[in-house]
Image (cartoon, rainbow, N blue to C red):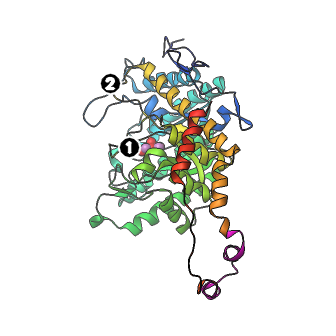
Amino acid sequence: MMEYFPGVEKVAYTDDPMREGLFFRHYSPDRIVGGKKMKDHLRFSMAYWHTISSGIGDMFGAGTAIRSWDSVSDPMALAEARAYGAFEFLDKIGMDYFCFHDRDIAPEGDTLAESNKNLDKIVKLIKKLMNDSGKKLLWGTASLFTNPRYVHGAATSPNAEVFAYAAGQVKKAMEITHELGGDGYVFWGGREGYETLLNTDMKREQDNLARFLHMAVDYAKEIGFTGQFLIEPKPKEPTKHQYDFDVASGIAFLKTYGLDEHFKFNVEANHATLAGHTFQHDLRVARINGLLGSVDANQGDMLLGWDTDQFPTNLYDTTLAMYEILKMGGFTKGGLNFDAKVRRASFMPEDLFYAHAAGMDAFAQGLVAADAIIRDNFLDDILEKRYSSYETGIGKEITEGRADFKSLEAYILNREEIENESGRQEYIESMLNEYIWRAK
Ligand code: XLS
Ligand code: NI
Ligand code: NI
């Protein structure tokens, strides 16, 4: 059998973090943390589009990636080679899940019918590879942004023909996700947004997006798909303004259109930061609303204002992300999908392995640190103390809904001074450092 990553062994854990070479230095899949195996906490997933189908080009230059399947020119043969390569990659990196767009796995034909035929062929192969390996599909999705027909959007296109095409395409993408036992189905609003309000009927576009999502909910019921539907917010790029700007605006949209019981969020780190939030912020907003479903694990660059999709290596972010995930009780149908690409200059096949291992280690260490923070009640104790005034006296009356403006005025009218306590941010940050440094 053809080997697509020759010379790369299965990545193993080493307890000597300074050992040279390709190893996990913190990720040890079967290690128990907080009563659960690391791999079951983290549910790592490979993004087919970045790791397998991309040539890692950028806006200014062609792809540089060197891959074993480069010499295959027939599009279907190439899709097959990539599928084999994908499963070899998953096996060697030791990851249980993957995610894809329909067009990542099979080439688009001249008609939707032809594209679907191509998909059927590759899905059959992928299903076999999944059965042989035990690898699983975290979520599927449809690319409603690459083809020029989606120039004005898909479900928000001013052109009803395009809406119909998108519906047909998503119908098929849901069917194959269901066929492959996917745990979820993602809606990232590719070009669902606008460039200028001068030519945009915002109300109609949002109404149409909601109609589209309701149709998806109905069709899932019809085919018995019970995976989690996920909205992936992003504030901009490719459009100047995306409708699913961030989790908070996503919640408003879902509630406005009666969709909130059918969807959760797939929170992507780099999208949160593009929206002017921290990664933790969007995870928190989703979590406290009971809507945190899954995570696209990557990171942006402080100096670059676009979705650079870098592999996540920042331990503060991974620790605080794992904190939110543990606080929600862990993933059920979600996971950590590396929606991340190697830099254009990291063009060797091995770079893919080093990149994923770096992200997996960063999240493993973040998990250990977050688990310790939770076990010690470190942040919970701080919150308990900080908000304790709401547990007794007048605060309790406010909390329990027994106070009103008149009773509060009567209570406070003759009070001379109120004492506040320090927020102790710097102390807390220094302790967070300790938790990260000590995470072993
Ligand atoms: C793009 C998005 C995309 C989604 C899936 O910015 O992150 O890759 O995750 O369509
Ligand atoms: Ni993403
Ligand atoms: Ni992204």
Q: Quadrant of residue 198?
A: bottom left
Give the magenta range. Answer: 390-410
Q: Is residue 404 left or right of residue 62?
A: right
Any part of residue 116 in sight:
no
Where is 346 relative to 287, above or below? above
Q: Residue at x 47, y 23 (%)?
A: 354
Where residue 430 appears, x then y in whole percent? 53, 44
Q: Which mark is residue 307?
A: 1
- Residue 396 in magenta stretch: yes
Image quadrant of ligand 1 equals top left
Label 1 to label 2: alpha-carbon separation:
19 Å
Q: Return the x and y of residue 264 as percentages of the image width and height.
A: 58, 54
- Badge 2 is on which residue? 64
| Percent position of residue 342, x then y | 41, 29
The answer to whether mark 1 is within 8 Å of ligand 3 is yes
Residue at left 54%, top 58%?
423
Q: Nearer the viewer, mark 1 or mark 2?
A: 1
103 in magenta: no
SS class, disc 1: loop
Residue 353 higher or lower than 142, as above or below: above
Q: Which of 62/9 is in front?
A: 9
In this rendering, is residue 270 above or below 381?
Answer: above
Residue 408's image quarter? bottom right
- Image quadrant occupied by the C terminus: top right
Query: Which is more N-terminal, label 2 or label 1?
Result: 2
In the displayed structure, does residue 73 sit left or right of residue 94? left
